Amino acid sequence: MNPVCYLCGQEIVNEMPSGDHTVQQQFIKRSQPKAKGFDYGGKIPTHAKCNNRFGPEKMCLRALQLLGIDNQIYVNSKNPEIKIQTFKKEELNSFSKEDFKFFGLIDTPYENWAPNPDFFKDKKPVNVLERALNIALSVLTKSAAALLVKRYQISPKSEWNILCMPYKLQKATDDFDSIFGKTKPFDIGIKIWIKKYKNSEDFFVRYKNEKMLLIIVFTFSQDETCLKACIETFQEAGKFLFKSPKLMDLVNYDWSNNAF
Ligand SMILES: [Zn+2]
């Protein structure tokens, strides 16, 4: 039997499967994949071309960084339709020129733009945080799905019905073992708790990374038991939906415009 690519749900024939890391390599800073005290997700087969399409994945760490820092919105007093999302430069010290360009960030001092509405004339409006959120949710959801396929016998040919609820954490050190149960980290600060929801076919995945806790609900049951319970329970949380027969559609997926 040929292996099935979990990204597109099709068999891998006449080619060597490409190994996709279930937990993105960029998150694992320790040198050995298998190390005492740490969990190791290993790899999962994909078509090389499917795997390669997840290019912006490498921006996930940057996206998480952006989502974790405080930002402020300024409204230009002369042109109130101009809204400016600002970040402190020292929070973005590790960002390269390419990172700035990728997220549509402009590196310029306050005096340049604050008194001068013309500064924005030739610039395309972007929502930096929306872009960061879209990337972070897609990459972490893909990783959670990979672990479900690899460890929990979820078919790579599944219909994917996914609800994401992101939370910004106050401290990167917050641990949730006392609430979700003890689990080994994949690296320092990176933990994933996976539980079946009651006796249903649905799964509840909590993904903690940097300063974000992401609750991901995978609904496989027809009656959407877990999905409905979550929507009622987590009333205050942002809720974003993804529904597709293939995880490939997570590439460039606009979560922000699929808020529940
Ligand atoms: Zn594929």
Image: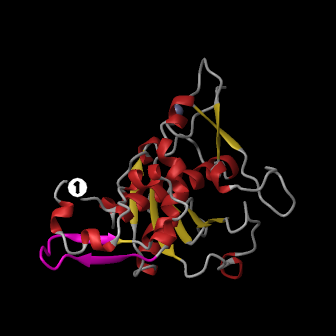
Magenta stretch contains residue 79? yes
Q: Work out whether residue 193 or residue 2 is closer to the camera in this orientation and state it.
A: 193
| Residue 65 image position (x, y, % from top left) | 52, 65
| Residue 249 image position (x, y, % from top left) | 41, 44
The kind of residue tagged 1 is: Lys
| Residue 20 image position (x, y, % from top left) | 63, 40
Q: Which residue is mark 1?
A: 123
Residue at screen point 80% across, 61% down: 38
Residue at screen point 35% across, 60% down: 106
Task: Please say if 42 is above or below 70.
Answer: above
Residue at screen point 45% across, 49% down: 98
Residue furthest to the left in view is: 78
| Residue 9 image position (x, y, % from top left) | 52, 36
Task: Please say if 203 is above or below 15.
Answer: below
Magenta stretch contains residue 72? yes
- The residue stretch that appears in magenta: 70-85
Colour style of the rendered protein structure: secondary structure
Q: In the image, 237: left or right of 182? A: left
Q: In the image, 81: left or right of 103? A: left
Q: Is residue 225 visible?
A: no
- Near mark 1 (Cα within 10 A), the count class, few <14, some 14-19 or many ≥20, is few
Q: Work out whether residue 43 or residue 65 is closer to the camera in this orientation and state it.
A: 65
Residue at screen point 14% across, 71% down: 81
Q: Secondary structure at mark 1?
A: loop
Q: What is the total number of numbered labels drawn onto the structure image?
A: 1
Q: Is residue 84 visible?
A: yes
Q: Work out whether residue 213 or residue 70 is closer to the camera in this orientation and state it.
A: 70
- Classify the position of the C terminus by image quarter: bottom left
Residue furthest to the top in view is: 14
- Classify the position of the N terminus by image quarter: top right
Q: Work out whether residue 174 or residue 17 is closer to the camera in this orientation and state it.
A: 174
